[in-house]
Image: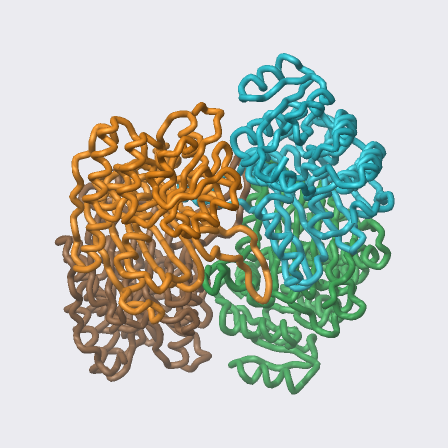
Chain colours: A brown, B cyan, C orange, D green
């Protein structure tokens, strides 16, 4: 595989995210092709493969990774299947783009970290795609420039129009707020050391058993306070905003106000209805960046350490959610490979 | 009348504007009181006067102006009655706030100018209230500062939700665009030298006989081009915007976006429905500034010359509207009193 | 005193706030005049009185309140002097507009409440002027309409360019966040039941001994969570924002973005530098509303109970600030007069 | 060439635009590769080709088009060379993406039209990339939906930070306003029937011989008036805005306000400095759409007729610019192939 060669990607999992990645690699991404798709549902995987020239269908990830035409792996299967897929990819020393979460808990994430260290080099990029959103990238750049001084507070909003019926309260943390966990760690270059979850009386539209919305508060080892409004059933759309309050100024992203319409007594515009619309460009850029780096023989982006740290903060978050207490985050020592 | 004395104001005309000014002086303005109201409708004027302590009712402006308790006159009668009221006020050497138009045409406005010159000092302030709007004032201040360099273009929008059934096409110029005429002259400190009126195919909602909207273009003696969208039946609300394009930057006012609401798939807010809501503060400030200056023995604000110039540009505008041609504006020489 | 009579106001205290109120009543407010000014600094009070026709100077509030030409009292002296001034006003049964705080602590506020109850009718309006800000009023109206459903969260920002050298950490609560306390109680129609104060590592620009910024969190008896960023030395200007998150939508005020300028590679505008500029209109409307109600023989606006409740929440807030703990607010039972 | 086959593209011209397209096809676009590059500068073209695997260098467009590995042609050479390149592509029946202008004048554009008609099917897409900008696409969609009623006016702004020293006054029309010509025709689905160019006194920063800014006004056969501010040396950045005024509302795009920063007394953000930054996504989408359609055997997007119409309007525009008169646009009859 040279830089100019087309990257043959095996996509593991053909559910919503997997199917979207298949489409993306097939139609959007430069320099890569879908060489294989894998799903335990043999019928579904065959129908996906049949639509793409030169794409083989597998029900076993290991078999796909052993195929000669597979140069890299995109893991989009359910979280509990990630560990096995990652370890198998390590056996073949294949570069992996792994959808978040890296694994469902900190203990399994640590095992992945150790396996990657045994390889002696990074192979995993974790799918925290917000890092590839143009607005988030601009905010990161501004914070890193130091023009506004040191960050002190980070106000975050994360609103979904609604969540599916299988959504549970811990998923507010594990599926939704996990993005703010990674985003905070990345924007600030700091680790999260403690989590609180505060709750108003739930919305009348909150699903049974889910206290919605919630106010999640992180403390970082750099002394920043992060507050996150997570509102899973806000009704009006999908909205992700962040405002960094620094010593000499603030910066806010996520208004996403584009076409302005005056009509019927009001001014305004549309709100995106889901994360696919809001973060389409981020997903595209993420996969393109992964393909580009892989073709150059490099590994970049969120590492397995970032995946592990998110898992550890999530565990603290779920405990904080259940207890109402401030819960500290206990992280393993950061291995040299990830410094 | 000393600065501390309360100014006794005679309000001539108790129609919509007059009644609003009566309320304003009675309830909002500091240092003035409604000493007299005048209307040819004897019943209406009495009912207005009865609601205010110490307020006399007249059907004859001259009688009101002769009353001892009248220190100043606010003319809010129909335009054709303005000339007589102004000349009568001059006979009593009373300060006047005259609602626009000064008079309905340039010839009568010139007669007012001449009469005021015979007095030897300014007595008239014309009611171009946009000059007292905080946003317009800030734009004027910025242009005057020279920070953006010389103004080159001025883009104006003037939108009404709808106009009453008696509205005629010349009123688009005489009643609506007259504000942009004064505003352009004032913001730029220049005279308008020519007018064009261009027309798209009218809106389906345009009243019979009115080509709505229109695009009115002014040239000024300072070489600025002004374009004005006048849209009298835009349906969605009242909106006045202006953007000055200068050599080193642009400045825009009139968005009037305040409370931002997210709901039902959209972000946005309300648009004011009429000029009373949009320019309430400007009207209040205008009358307060007139009262304050009058109590100090001064005359400020838009002069009779400004009223005359607006009338002259209106005449050209109506001709341009009727002919589709570029029509030049012929102004009398500016008298020393107004330099 | 009839509705039409001009209200003679005694202004107690001629410091920054007092002097501004004297100017306001003299120049802006309709239907009132400054009949007396009071200050322990005899020279200063005389120089203030001398500039206003018919205004007497006093060094003793009681003497001023006994004067025949005094119909109402505006208390703008330092907080510790408020209790005595209020009790004296009660003795004369005079209507009072009392600058916040009502008194410096809950115990003294309770004494004022009791004294007013002995009068048998309300006499006090407390100077929480944000209730008179047009944007806050619109937010209140929207919340009350129920269009967005029940409020769940209220995000508040309160930023000062800088604070004077005598500012202390408890003043962050007592002088600044006290506005968000009243604003939350008023917008929501709920009492605050507990307070937390969380702190990031302070800004390098924080004055010695002040942990700036802080994140203050209120719980209400209606189950709403309120978070307040108080940043006393943000450097860039004065900014007050609030976003109510409700069951079916959110509403945000305080952007205060008016004239938009494009220049030198950027778009943007100015930020007000202090509360006088930001809330000028609110102050004017507050005093005008007080004068209008007083002339009608009515008492409206924030009551002594609101002043007491703010004092009680402040005490909890200062304790929360000092201890880092969640502190509950203990309120006396609400007397019938204030229901 | 099947849909799944990678499209081999010959890029004609390796100047600024050509080099950018080479990079785009190589790094961004899915399903295409740069099979050949052509430039009369043999050294330059070789150095470009050497950086891309499997890319041949040519100095003669005809030789490149004859190569077996070339499936399609992207013409990015100077305008005067377009006609020959297009005719050669027609000889090979190759699909072409031709950078605007189609050709430098209406007569040569007509010859291209006729040649394509002789082929009997469309082969040319013209590079009016604004049609692929997400905001313009949303505006088009809204106008087409009829929700706002019929369009009446279209206000356009086109501002450049500065123009290079070789820029001439006709280039204001031919290079800059040509975008608004196509955009107006496309958004409205109407032809332009007349052009006026009005001028303020030029900016002090206008290059010698260029009256900058100008106000260009189009009339359309659907009765819409379009006004275009073209300001080639505005100094502050690159800005393209459009507001459609319709019977029941207006819609505006191009604010491009994303990250909002508060600092140093002001709120605001950055303005893109050139069209590459502003329209990066539009360029990417345009080429991807061309590649996708070509691989499906289809031709879409702006046609040779659109290129011809733009050329005809430009000729009228340059005459209007030179004469100050209203100049009508004379279009040939629209051939069946382009209906």
Q: Quadrant of residue A36?
A: bottom left
Q: Nearer the viewer, residue C50 or C122?
A: C50
Q: Give coordinates of residue B161: x percent, y percent.
A: 60, 33
Examine the rendering and report whether any part of residue D122 can be seen: no
Q: Quadrant of the N terminus of chain A?
A: bottom left
The mark tally for this picture is: 0
Q: Quadrant of residue B211?
A: top right
- Position of residue A159 in the picture relative to residue C5 (left or right): left
- Position of residue A153 in the picture relative to residue B235 (left or right): left
Q: Quadrant of residue B249?
A: bottom right
Residue at the (25%, 48%) spot, across then down:
C104
Q: Give coordinates of residue A307: x percent, y percent.
A: 25, 68
Q: Nearer the viewer, residue A28 or B288?
A: B288
Q: Quadrant of the C terminus of chain A?
A: bottom left
Taking C160 as reference, is B115 above or below it? above
Q: Give coordinates of residue C83: x percent, y percent.
A: 26, 42
Q: Give coordinates of residue A253: x percent, y percent.
A: 42, 59
Examine the rendering and report whether any part of residue B160 can be seen: yes
Residue at the (61%, 33%) spot, across then down:
B7
Taking B183 as reference, is A315 above or below it? below
């Amino acid at each position: 595989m040279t830089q100019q060669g087309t990257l043959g990607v095996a996509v593991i999992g053909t559910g919503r995210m997997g199917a979207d990645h298949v489409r993306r690699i097939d139609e959007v991404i430069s320099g890569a092709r879908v060489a294989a798709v894998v799903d335990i549902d043999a019928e579904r995987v065959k129908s996906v493969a049949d639509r793409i020239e030169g794409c083989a269908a597998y029900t076993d990830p290991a078999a796909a990774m052993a195929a000669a035409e597979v140069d890299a792996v995109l893991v989009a299967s359910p979280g509990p299947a990630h560990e096995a897929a990652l370890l198998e990819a390590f056996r073949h020393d294949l570069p992996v783009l792994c959808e978040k979460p890296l694994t469902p808990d900190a203990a399994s994430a640590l095992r992945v970290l150790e396996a990657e260290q045994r390889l002696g080099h990074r192979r995993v990029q974790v799918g925290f795609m917000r890092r590839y959103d143009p607005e988030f990238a601009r905010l990161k750049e501004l914070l890193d420039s130091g023009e506004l001084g040191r960050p002190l507070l980070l106000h975050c909003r994360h609103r979904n129009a609604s969540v599916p019926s299988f959504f549970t309260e811990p998923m507010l943390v594990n599926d939704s707020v996990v993005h703010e966990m990674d985003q905070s760690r990345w924007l600030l270059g700091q680790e999260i050391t403690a989590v609180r979850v505060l709750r108003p009386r739930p919305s009348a539209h909150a699903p049974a058993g889910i206290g919605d919305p919630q106010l999640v508060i992180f403390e970082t080892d750099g002394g920043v306070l992060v507050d996150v409004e997570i509102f899973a059933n806000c009704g009006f759309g999908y909205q992700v905003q962040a405002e960094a309050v620094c010593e000499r100024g603030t910066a806010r992203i996520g208004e996403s106000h584009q076409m302005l319409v005056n009509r019927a007594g009001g001014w305004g515009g549309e709100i995106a209805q889901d994360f696919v619309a809001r973060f389409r460009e981020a997903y595209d850029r993420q996969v393109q960046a992964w393909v580009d780096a892989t073709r150059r023989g490099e590994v970049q982006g969120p590492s397995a350490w970032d995946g592990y740290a998110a898992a550890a903060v999530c565990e603290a978050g779920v405990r904080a959610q259940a207890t109402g207490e401030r819960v500290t985050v206990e992280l393993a020592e950061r291995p040299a490979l990830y410094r």
